[in-house]
Each structure stands twice: as structure tokens, then as C-alpha cells.
Image: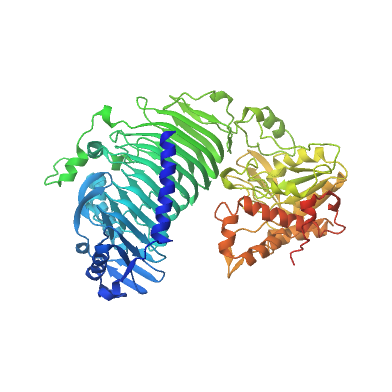
């Protein structure tokens, strides 16, 4: 607790320092324009000497180095204490393609201390340095990437795969080494790094805030890590947007015998509010673990489908080290293959360096890499880890966890996991683990295979396995898919769904996907559906509002899982049902991950499939067919159906949000009109609000890249639903609005 309080105090100081360095300046900085020292932004003149002169001049009494618009070719630059390097929009520093322009200096690369080319931008043994602005630093990576692949093609057949990373000299983009009070960010773009993009080495009190990293332009560079925090402390990384071809947000602490010799931990780290579009994982610890890790927190991180792992811990049996007091929470993983991935036998061809017979005249660092580590020192020990509020959809395997029988993974606590995966996976070599209050849906109905592990009450944790409830549904003609199951003992075998509080009152039921009710409707991962805040717009003494929407469902699977049949049984004359489907209907009909798609359109076409998830023969219909069934069933019970077009995604084109009137929005309207049901053009109503606000103001209304809204976004959408409901013929819900609902003006969207 004392360490957590300390790091929170430090974080407040880090933010304050950033404001002073890059925002409100108490003492006016002297500005040094590099062009006045001979720098030319013509893309061809080598500007290393000119820019360094400006930096050295600014360092005398402290000052800011800036540039006129242009592209400046340069070799290694070395920032000094008290200097701010400002790159305004329109300014690009591009790295030289000549290795001689990067002097060889002592540093650490991939876990060992070595003499290597300097980075393009270096802060070595300095204090109070800032790099800011909305300009670009471009490493011109493809030439360096090719040099690596050419060398590896020669080395790999000789059993020297492990040496390729060290012998292929490639400049990093930015290095902070043995420095303190460092700030980087302000909207800067870092791209095409030759090797790691930002390495924070042997440093402390570092704040990275607002960087965009794009290393997959012009190819996919090897080892183009995003931000590597390497044997450093008191580091805050936030608001990073990363697209790389290796570790994205990564903690390191040395490799094998050399890392154990240096023995410097990475500690007091916070990483938050970031997105990983491509890279190895949402958050990585390792594989360089020798110095250890303590007091690590990572949260509010989104990873997209090109990212193979969510939480990735990796090491090897020669690395040693430890990790403890690690807290990872509020992750959103969209299509990430393995949400929880832990391996202590990472990439053997890289991790276990041995000299092939007959190799002579080896460099000194090959000796370092091949020095044997005794087993008792080489085994890594990870313990006291808490992972919570993790939401993963489209996963291949929920867990892939393993260590060693004599170096187990101890005291892990996992709770409030919401994972949809093809299969559950494996957990091995785990001691004193608890997994609680989680929903883990597996397409194959599996639960994790526990090997050499002790898990608290594992038999009471349901992981999508068929049980009496799902077997009952499987025998029902309407059911073709087992529901998601819950690890909350209070919920039984199916997640609990709300029911009317007062059965004597009319009820307004909400049916749809996660944009209506996200998870449990409790704001996990900062994501809310509009069905939660809409309750406040109705008078609870006059009508129940019951949100029975369910994340991940399409118009088809809400029926085939038996959810609709359950609701129909509760319907009575005078009730209302609002439907919003479409976001999940466009997927495949019979893939092995979801099998939730519907046939596009509103016709009567159908297709027979053998559902690979349910192992049952199924007839799949059009989106319109399923929507008509909802309306017909509702009307048959004397209730009133209302159809909403799906809310818009945060996708912009020509300054406006893209509408869906040409597909699901239009089809929803056509079905409603053909059945004489109420229709709310929610897509258009909300989209017009987004257009008026503009991209910058819409951004905080979402809690993920484009689909799920934040609390503020859900509140706005709920009000839009009410505005649309008021335009229905006869305003059938007018008697049930609360004072808040009565204050909303009608809006047709047109």
C-alpha cells in the first residue's frame, strides 16, 4: 500500500512537470531555430552537425530547439539537460541510411550491455529534457529491416538465430539512458524505426504522453518494439497509439547472465489509456526478466485483431528474475487470439544461445550470451498478480499458461473476465490461483485443462460447459447454441437476466446487443450501452424498464440461444419491446468462432448449415426474417414492438459519420414499416449529433476504437432513443416518461 501511494504521488508530479515543460511555462524559454545554425529541410542535406549546434547552444542556459517546416535528414542527435526539442506540425526528422552516422556507444540491447549504434535521438546522462510537438521522427526503417533479414538468412542455418538480433546493427529511434525528468509526447508521430522505437533505459521520472507509433509502413520491420521500459523506475506512459511488429508496451529488465550481473529491476510503472493496433500484445512483461519487476500497473488498454496476445508474460529458464505486485485491469481485446498468455519457455531458438561446433573469432558479446546460468538462478518467478475487468471477443483460446514445476506461477487473482473464445485452453504450473466473477464463453463448451496447478474451487467455475440448463435448451426446437456461462456462483449456469420489478405494471423490454447492454451493464472497461441510462427517462412507479440485451448477439443468435423464448413467456398485453440488432449480423454464418451471421437483406432466402459450434443442423434466414419473427411474436402477445436502426459506429468519411441506411438501418426501417411497427431511426438521429459535434468532441463519447460508447456516449444515445420514441404515431409511451423524459424534445432524425 505504501508503494502504491508513493507512485500515485509521483504520477501527480510527473503530470505537473509535463505541464510546466510543454504547456504553461513559468519562465519564457529562449528559442533556438535550427535553420539559423545551418539546418536545411530539403530531405537531402545531412543536418547532423547543424542541429547539434543548435542543441548545444540551447543547453548553455536551457532553451527550446525548433525548426522551420521541412524534412531534415540527420544522423544521431544528443539532447542535453534543460533542452526541449520541439517538432512542430510540418517538420520531419528522418534518419540517415548510413551506419557511420550513428556512433558506436555503450548501451544495452535486448537484455545485454553492448557497444551498439546510437539512436537517432539520444538523451544520455541528462536531466530535464523534453521532446514535443506534432511533427514526425522517421527512422527510414526498410533499409535496416532488410539488413537484419539478410543476416538472419545466413545465420539461421548455422544455428546462430539468437545472434542475428545483436549482429545486425540497427539504430533505435529514441533512447533515454541513465537520465531523469524526461518528457516525450504532445502528439508526436514516431515511424519506421530501424529497431526499438522508444527505449527507456536505466532512467527514472519519465513521462510519455501522446505518442503515435507507426512502424508497419513500407513493410513489417523486425523487432520494431513500441515503448520498452528497461530497468527503469517511476515511468508513466499514457495516450499511446501503437502499430508495430513486435512488443508494443513492454517491460524489460535484462537477459541471462548479464542481466543477473546488472541486477536492476523495473519498478513503479504505470501504463494506461492506450491502444495497440498491431504488435505482440496489449501489455508485455519480458522476455528479458533478469532484474525483476515490482509495482506495475497497466489499465485502460485496447488491443485489436492483429495483436495475438492480451496479457503476455514471457521468459526462459536461463533468464531468472521475478515479477510481483503486478496489476492489470480494464483491457478491451477485440479479436485478440489469446487474452491471457504466459510462457516461461519463450522462443527457444532466440532464448537459448549455444555456439555451434567449430565457430572461431567470436565477438565478446557472444561469450556473454552463451555464458551458462545455474538452474537455481535461471528460473523466473512470477507471483502476486491481479488481472481484472478484461473483456475479450473473438479469441481463439482463453488461456495459454505454463511455467515450471519447480518455479510455479504463484498467487494470481483473476476476476471479472468476460471472454468469448473458440476454446478454453490450458493452465499449468499454477499455485494458489483464484478465478472469480467471470463469464467465459467457449464455442466448443470446454473448460481449461489444469495441469500441475492448484486453483481455488476449480470445479465450481463454469467455463461454457454444457449443463442441465443448456441440455434442456439443446432439446428445444428453438435452441441451437449453448449460452455463455458464469463463474459467479450466484448466477447458476447462465448469466442472470433482469426481470420486471413490479409485474403488475407495464414493462418496456430492451432487446439487442452490447451497444444496448454491455457486459453486466456496470460500465466494465468504461463501456456502457444506452439501455442502462435510459431507465432515468421513465417513471418507475408507472412502468418497468428491463434491459435484456446481451453482448455479442445477432438477431439470429438471440433467438437460437432461447433468449427470445424466455422473454416471450413474460410478455403481456400493454408491454413494449424495443429491438436494436445489426452490429453482429454481418459475420459468417458457420465459422468456428461465432457462427452468428444472418443472410443480408429482408427476403425469405434461407441456407441450411451444419453449425460447427453447436454441432447441430440449422436453417439460417435473412436479417429481415428474424426481425419479422420478433415483431409477430410481440404482437401475438398483445404487446407493442418498436424497431431501432443500429447506432452508428465512430467511422468518419468526408467530415461526417458513416450511416447504415443502405444496409441494416434501411432493412430495419423496411421491416418495421411492412409490419406496421414503430420505427426509430436511431442511426440517423445520433449521427446528426456526431456530425454537429465533430470528430474531436465525439472521441470521448466512445470507450473503444469505434463501437462501444463511454458513459457520456451512452447518456447521449439514451436521450436520442427517447427523442425518437416521442415521434412514434400516437406517442404510445407518453404517459410513462419521468420529468427528465418529458423534457426531451422529439426528433425524427430527418
Q: In which quadrant of the rendered view does residue 668 lie?
A: bottom right
For the N terminus, which image quadrant?
Answer: top left
Q: Quadrant of residue 726?
A: bottom right
> Does residue 675 appear to the left or right of 535 in the view shown?
right
Please tell me how many numbered marks the rendered image carries: 0
- Left or right: where does residue 645 sit relative to residue 122? right
Residue 599 at least partly seen: no
Residue 12 or residue 423, whichever sits in front: 12
What residue is rendered at 29% in x and 37% in y? 291
Q: Image height check: is 502 above or below 722?
A: above
Q: Nearer the viewer, residue 537 or 126?
A: 126
Residue located at (65% from left, 37% from top)? 483
Can residue 449 be seen in the rendering of this structure?
yes
Can you give x and y, in whole percent of width and height, for residue 416 in the image?
56, 36
Question: Does 455 appear above or below 25?
Answer: above
Q: Is residue 176 left or right of residue 703?
A: left
Which corner quadrant holds the C terminus?
bottom right
**Picture quarter containing residue 372?**
top left
Locate residue 269 relative to residue 365 in the image: left or right: right
Give percent across and percent down for residue 57.
24, 67
In the figure, 748 relative to 37: above or below? above
Placement of 141 over or under 234, stated as above or below = below
Residue in view at x 45 percent, y 46 percent: 308
Q: Position of residue 654 (x, y in %)?
A: 58, 70
Give the residue at the far front of this rendering.
27
The image's colouring method is: rainbow
Q: Position of residue 171 (x, y in %)?
A: 27, 57
Amino acid at each position: 500500500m505504501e508503494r502504491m501511494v508513493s507512485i500515485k504521488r509521483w504520477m501527480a508530479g510527473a503530470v505537473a512537470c509535463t505541464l510546466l515543460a510543454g504547456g504553461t511555462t513559468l519562465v519564457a524559454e529562449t528559442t533556438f531555430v535550427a535553420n539559423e545554425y545551418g539546418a536545411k529541410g530539403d530531405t537531402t542535406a545531412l543536418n547532423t552537425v547543424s542541429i547539434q549546434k543548435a542543441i548545444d547552444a540551447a543547453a548553455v542556459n536551457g532553451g527550446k530547439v525548433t525548426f522551420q517546416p521541412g524534412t531534415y535528414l540527420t544522423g544521431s542527435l544528443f539532447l542535453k539537460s534543460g533542452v526541449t526539442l520541439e517538432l512542430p506540425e510540418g517538420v520531419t526528422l528522418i534518419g540517415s541510411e548510413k551506419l557511420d552516422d550513428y556512433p558506436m556507444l555503450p548501451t544495452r540491447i535486448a537484455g545485454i550491455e553492448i557497444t551498439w549504434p546510437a539512436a537517432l535521438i539520444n538523451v544520455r546522462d541528462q536531466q530535464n529534457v523534453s521532446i514535443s510537438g506534432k511533427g514526425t521522427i522517421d527512422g527510414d526503417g526498410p533499409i535496416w529491416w532488410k539488413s537484419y533479414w539478410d543476416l538472419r538468412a545466413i545465420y539461421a542455418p548455422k544455428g546462430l538465430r539468437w545472434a542475428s538480433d545483436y549482429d545486425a546493427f540497427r539504430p533505435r529511434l529514441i533512447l533515454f539512458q541513465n537520465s531523469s525528468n524526461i518528457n516525450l509526447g504532445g502528439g508526436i508521430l514516431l515511424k519506421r524505426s530501424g529497431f526499438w522505437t522508444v527505449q527507456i533505459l536505466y532512467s527514472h521520472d519519465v513521462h510519455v504522453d501522446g505518442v503515435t507509433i507507426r512502424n508497419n509502413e513500407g513493410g513489417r520491420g523486425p523487432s520494431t518494439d513500441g515503448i520498452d521500459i528497461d530497468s527503469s523506475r517511476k515511468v508513466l506512459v499514457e495516450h499511446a497509439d501503437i502499430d508495430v511488429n513486435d512488443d508494443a508496451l513492454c517491460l524489460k529488465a535484462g537477459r541471462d547472465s548479464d542481466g543477473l550481473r546488472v541486477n536492476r529491476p523495473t519498478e513503479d510503472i504505470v501504463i494506461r489509456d492506450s491502444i495497440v493496433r498491431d504488435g505482440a500484445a496489449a501489455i508485455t512483461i519480458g522476455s528479458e526478466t533478469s532484474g525483476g519487476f515490482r509495482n506495475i500497473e497497466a489499465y485502460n488498454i485496447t488491443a485489436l485483431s492483429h495483436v495475438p496476445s492480451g496479457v503476455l508474460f514471457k521468459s526462459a529458464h536461463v533468464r531468472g528474475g521475478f515479477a510481483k505486485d503486478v496489476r492489470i485491469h480494464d483491457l478491451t481485446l477485440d479479436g485478440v487470439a489469446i487474452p491471457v498468455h504466459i510462457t516461461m519457455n519463450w522462443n527457444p531458438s532466440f532464448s537459448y544461445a549455444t555456439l555451434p561446433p567449430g565457430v572461431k573469432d567470436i565477438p565478446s558479446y557472444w561469450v556473454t550470451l552463451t555464458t551458462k546460468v545455474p538452474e537455481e538462478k535461471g528460473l523466473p518467478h512470477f507471483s502476486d498478480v491481479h488481472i481484472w475487468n478484461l473483456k475479450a471477443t473473438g479469441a481463439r483460446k482463453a488461456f495459454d499458461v505454463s511455467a515450471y514445476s519447480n518455479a510455479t506461477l504463484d498467487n494470481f487473482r483473476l476476476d471479472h473476465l468476460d471472454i468469448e473464445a473458440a476454446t478454453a485452453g490450458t493452465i499449468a504450473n499454477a499455485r494458489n490461483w483464484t478465478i472469480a466473477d467471470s463469464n467465459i464463453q467457449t464455442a466448443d463448451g470446454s473448460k481449461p485443462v489444469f495441469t500441475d496447478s492448484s486453483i481455488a474451487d476449480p470445479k465450481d467455475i463454469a467455463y461454457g460447459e454444457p449443463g442441465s440448463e443448456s441440455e434442456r435448451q439443446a432439446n428445444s426446437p428453438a435452441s441451437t447454441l449453448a449460452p455463455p456461462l458464469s463463474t459467479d456462483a450466484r448466477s447458476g449456469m447462465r448469466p442472470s437476466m433482469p426481470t420486471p420489478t413490479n409485474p403488475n405494471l407495464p414493462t418496456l423490454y430492451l432487446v439487442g446487443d452490447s451497444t444496448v447492454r454491455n457486459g453486466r451493464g456496470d460500465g466494465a472497461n468504461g463501456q456502457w450501452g444506452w439501455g442502462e441510462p435510459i431507465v432515468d427517462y421513465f417513471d418507475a412507479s408507472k412502468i418497468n424498464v428491463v434491459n435484456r440485451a446481451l453482448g455479442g448477439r445477432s438477431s439470429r443468435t438471440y433467438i437460437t440461444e432461447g433468449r427470445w423464448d424466455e422473454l416471450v413467456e413474460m410478455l403481456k398485453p400493454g408491454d413494449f419491446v424495443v429491438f436494436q440488432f445489426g452490429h453482429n449480423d454481418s459475420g459468417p454464418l458457420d465459422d468456428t468462432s461465432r457462427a452468428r451471421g444472418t443472410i443480408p437483406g429482408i427476403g425469405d432466402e434461407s441456407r441450411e448449415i451444419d453449425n460447427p459450434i453447436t454441432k447441430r443442423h440449422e436453417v439460417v434466414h435473412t436479417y429481415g426474417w428474424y426481425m419479422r419473427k420478433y415483431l409477430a411474436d410481440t404482437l401475438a402477445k398483445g404487446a407493442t414492438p418498436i424497431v431501432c436502426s443500429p447506432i452508428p459506429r465512430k467511422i468518419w468519411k468526408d467530415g461526417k459519420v458513416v450511416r447504415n441506411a443502405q444496409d441494416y438501418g434501411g432493412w430495419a426501417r423496411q421491416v418495421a414499416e411492412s409490419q406496421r411497427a414503430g420505427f426509430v431511426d436511431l442511426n440517423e438521429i445520433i449521427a446528426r449529433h456526431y456530425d454537429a459535434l465533430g470528430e474531436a468532441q465525439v472521441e470521448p463519447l466512445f470507450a473503444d476504437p469505434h463501437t462501444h460508447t463511454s458513459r457520456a456516449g451512452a447518456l447521449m444515445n439514451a436521450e436520442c432513443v427517447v427523442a425518437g420514441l416521442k415521434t412514434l404515431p400516437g406517442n404510445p409511451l407518453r404517459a410513462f416518461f419521468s420529468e427528465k423524459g418529458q423534457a426531451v424534445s422529439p426528433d425524427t432524425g430527418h
